[in-house]
Amino acid sequence: MRGLAAAHPELAVDVEARVVSRAGGTRPGKVGLVSGGGSGHEPLHAGFVGHGMLDAAACGAVFTSPVPDQVLAATRAASGGAGVLHVVKNYTGDVLNFRMAAELADDDDVEVATVLVDDDVAVTDSTYTAGRRGTGATLFVEKVVGAAAEEDLALAELAALGREVVERSRSFGVALSPCTTPGSDKPGFDLPAGEMELGIGIHGEPGRERVPLATSREIAAIAVGAIADDAPVGGEELLVLVNGAGGTPLLELQVLAGDVHAELQGRGARVVRMLVGNHVTSLEMAGAMVSVCRLDERLLRLWDAPVATPALRWGR
Amino acid sequence: MSAVAREALDAAAAREWLRGFAAAVAERSGELTDLDRPVGDSDHGVNLRRGTEAVLAALDADGAGGAGGADGTPGQVLGAAGRTLVSTVGGASGPLFGTALRRAGKALGEVPAADAAQVAAALRAALEGVVRLGEARVGDATMVDALDPAVAAFERAAQEGAPLPRAARAAAGAAAEGAASTVPLVARKGRASYLGPRSRGHLDPGARSVELLLTALADALGADALDARAGEGA
């Protein structure tokens, strides 16, 4: 965090509370956008604080959601009087801590709304379970809703927009090697060379299935197939994120991106925007996640809107 | 571990309970994290230990509690510890274990020394708080699978007139059985649920921590001393 502060004087970094916010605070009248979660996913979330995205981020311990006090501190830092929107990845810990923080913020008379991100098709959704994980679509929500917040949309409209982005987004991830949570002396799972783990999350937790290592083209077909089985992509205009897990070289991600693009086109989809890189990571895990969002004119405009954060920056 | 069987849970016993739980978590932090590896993200022991160490530090800093003194009420001691867990652990364990202690503390109210029926009511309140927050039920392969039967066992023992330490030992035993019962289950809540059928065959780490918590309660109340005395009498 000290490194982030050193490189980005435009950010206010509270090393003690582990909260990152915009140095100038939130402009009065603008809804504050707050996210957060466990660390180990860098640049998510602190790297997305800045114009056009988040107003503040709360950074928990590695792979552990921030505590309510941290989320409350981020909420206060992001409050410009027009309410605060929490963008929460759907994990039990994140949901519980943000819920407790929202109740505390209510005591402060800060109005809070929440968007829950649950885009991972590897988890079978059911009303009886914790539901799907939040993964790559978190970036879509933070970017699109962040752009809309700069245009002074009201809290309820931003929450609805965020939910629409989630509804239009799907993700699927593959791991080629595991990662080791600090404090633990072993990796999150043992993965022999020559095998890969399908349907992984972003915490080094095992996936749903283990299969022999496949080529980039085959991985693209598996990931896109899993996504398309859940929400058809044919005829859609797509925003695509080919996201590295942290330990896969950009060169290999670009190979995969090419194959994902071809696979989607083969299914009749039109890829109108593509982002390739390590944006939502899992420490040193090798692997990648494919996220897609079905765009319309408005979402495309908000995606293209200027953004100036440590990790995402264009059009300004 | 208390060398004498206690007839009531007072503030000193509550502090001893928390110290015992912290010691158990410190000792078994690696085991808890190992349990979390196949079904979660390999950090349960590390996270819980961060919280129980903060609870210990608070007990030490608090003058009355530092020396294991009897100041305050057991409800205050448990409530403060619960708030510390919520503020330090993070993840799902922080809110859930923290809420359990906060609710237990609140249920005890101002009583200076809680009898078996009052402790039973406090444990019931803890369970209800956890269920409300986590929305898990028995059979979901979570901490509720240990806590629910433990509370029931405590209530049963208390109703049958068992001394407080023995009721706590019964609860600890039921928690252990409940934790073991999570092994064949497919997790439906918490991070293990992402694995689907692959979550089968693993003991839920949160359930194991509940077992440690209730074992620490039985130890703090001197259940073993009571058993030893019963043995001598026979």
Image: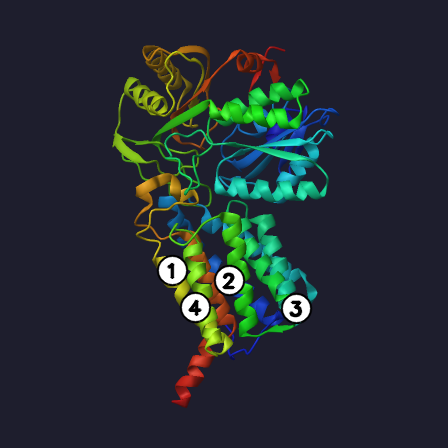
Mark 1 falls on what kind of element? helix
Residue at the image point whose x is 56% and y is 13% from the top:
A298
Return the residue nearer the eye: B204 or B136.
B136
Residue at label 4?
B153
Q: Secondary structure at mark 2?
A: helix
Give me the residue at 46% from left, 42% from top: A182
Three-letter amino acid code of the residue under disc 3: Thr
Q: Quadrant of residue A204?
A: top left
Q: Quadrant of the N terminus of chain A?
A: top right
Q: Are marks 4 and 2 on the same chain?
A: yes
Label 4, label 2: how far apart the Cα atoms are? 20 Å
Q: Is residue B38 visible?
A: yes
Mark 4–mark 3 Cα distance, whole angstroms, equals: 25 Å
The answer for which chain carries disc 3 is B
| Dot 3 or dot 1, earlier in sequence | 3
Residue A193 visible to the viewer: no
* Quadrant placement of the C terminus of chain A: top right
